[in-house]
Image: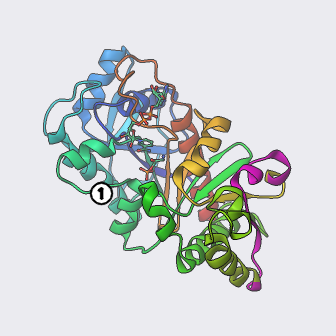
């Protein structure tokens, strides 16, 4: 099977376009279809003095590998030319159109998977469009109530109960039904997509010391433990809730196939310390495969040609592997 992978380079003023050009240089056994503005990619390649040939994408033709120095293209036009490092609100709808077009292609099975580059959440909101992240955007577009953000690096997988939420709202969002949905999706994905027969999931508490027996918060006793007990009764292998600073130690991690953190900055700093630069963000629970980079738009280095594309390569490799496994 030759997987057909949609690639959205993301924010045009960020490092996404140059990472796409670097990715093209290596070629691929998969068919990589950039859903982007062709002029942006050609201009970026010229600035970096890298070769780039954009090949027309025909969804009716059989998938073919991507020759090195090339990308297939499904064009979407920017409103205005992009300048590296300078955000421009008129181009925000373009960014979302690339995401929508690529995701609809996945839903229609024109693509086997979607790999996304980084978007700038701030500039999209500054343009008057409510947007908190790809994860939430794709869930809404696909009509799915709940998805799970999981980042994976080497031997560590970290999934999140809440994603792009102000810290003051986290406690109220950690509810029994939400935990049950998230853990069920995580368990099924580890089993069915990642082929782990009996996944073991370590669950962090919300409070310091997992609430210290109720003296430092009662969410563990009143919400998290009852939800875990319900799922254990169904046969799920769940460890915890443990204090996050205990769970993220090597002996505990050795007992887990994935760690579930209650909020973004409880889990992701640990994951990035372990694997920044080659970690992959995977959305679980969508009706299509979506992987992404572990970093943001890096406006401070955009256009300089120094951005590392290890995470984009890893995201592509993971998407190809998941697409091949799904086709078996
Ligand atoms: N997948 C996505 O769409 C993501 C988007 N973001 C968005 O990115 C924007 C900027 O976020 P920041 O917190 O500044 O994080 P950032 O990841 O863009 O930058 C943090 C630091 O890491 C460096 N860096 C990032 N990627 C790099 C690469 N590939 N090679 C070399 N150095 C790299 C940057 O130069 C900067 O010094 C925000 O709007 C955020 O929402 C953040 C994370 C993921
Ligand atoms: N920190 C991870 C991140 O912000 C990526 O979010 P998303 O855009 O993939 O939903």
Where residue 229 sits in the image (x, y, percent)?
73, 81
| Location of mark 1 (residue) | 100
Tag count? 1
Where residue 81 sits in the image (x, y, percent)?
16, 30
Nearest to the observer: residue 208 or residue 251: 208
Quadrant of the snapshot with the C terminus: bottom right
Nearest to the observer: residue 260 or residue 35: 260
Where residue 276 sits in the image (x, y, percent)?
59, 35
Is any part of residue 203 visible from this angle?
A: no
Using the image, determine if residue 175 lies above or below residue 290: below
Taking the magenta stretch, the answer to whether it contains residue 239 is: yes
Secondary structure beneath label 1: helix
Residue 119 shown left or right of residue 5 in the figure: left
Provide the residue span drawn in magenta: 233-252
Where residue 213 sits in the image (x, y, percent)?
74, 68
Residue 153 shown left or right of residue 25 in the figure: right
Quadrant of the snapshot with the N terminus: bottom right
- x 37%, y 23%: residue: 300
- x 54%, y 44%: residue: 315
Question: Dot 1: within a 10 Å radius of its alpha carbon, few (fewer than 14), some, or many (20 or more) residues?
Answer: some
Nearest to the observer: residue 305 or residue 296: 296
Taking the magenta stretch, the answer to whether it contains residue 142 is: no
- x 64%, y 43%: residue: 270
């Amino acid at each position: 099977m030759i997987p057909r992978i949609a690639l959205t380079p993301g924010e045009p003023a960020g490092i996404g376009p140059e990472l796409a050009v670097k990715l093209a240089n290596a070629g691929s056994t998969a068919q990589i279809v950039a859903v982007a503005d062709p002029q942006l990619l050609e201009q970026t390649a010229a600035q970096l003095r890298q070769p780039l040939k954009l090949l027309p994408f025909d969804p009716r033709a059989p998938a073919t590998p991507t020759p090195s120095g090339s990308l297939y293209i499904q064009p979407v036009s920017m409103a205005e030319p992009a300048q590296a490092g300078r955000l421009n609100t008129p181009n925000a709808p373009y960014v979302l159109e690339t995401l929508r077009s690529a995701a609809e292609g996945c839903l229609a099975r024109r693509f086997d998977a979607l790999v996304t580059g980084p978007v700038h959440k701030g500039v999209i909101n500054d343009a008057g469009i409510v947007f908190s992240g790809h994860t939430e955007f794709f869930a809404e577009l696909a009509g799915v109530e709940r998805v799970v953000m999981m980042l994976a690096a080497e031997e560590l997988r970290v999934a999140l109960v809440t994603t792009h939420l102000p810290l003051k709202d986290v406690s109220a969002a950690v509810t029994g039904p939400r935990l049950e949905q998230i853990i069920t999706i995580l368990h099924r994905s580890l089993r069915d997509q990642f082929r782990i027969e009996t996944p073991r999931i370590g669950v962090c508490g919300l409070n310091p010391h997992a609430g210290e027996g109720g003296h430092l918060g009662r969410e563990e006793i009143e919400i998290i433990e009852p939800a875990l007990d319900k799922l254990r009764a169904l046969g799920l292998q769940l460890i915890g809730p443990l204090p996050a600073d205990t769970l993220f130690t090597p002996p505990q991690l050795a007992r887990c196939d994935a760690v579930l953190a209650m909020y973004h900055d409880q889990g992701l700093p640990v994951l990035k310390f372990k694997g920044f630069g080659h970690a992959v963000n995977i959305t679980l629970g969508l009706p299509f495969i979506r992987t992404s980079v572990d970093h943001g738009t890096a406006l401070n280095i955009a256009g300089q040609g120094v951005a590392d594309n290890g995470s984009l390569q890893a995201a592509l490799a993971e998407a190809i592997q998941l697409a091949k496994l799904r086709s078996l």
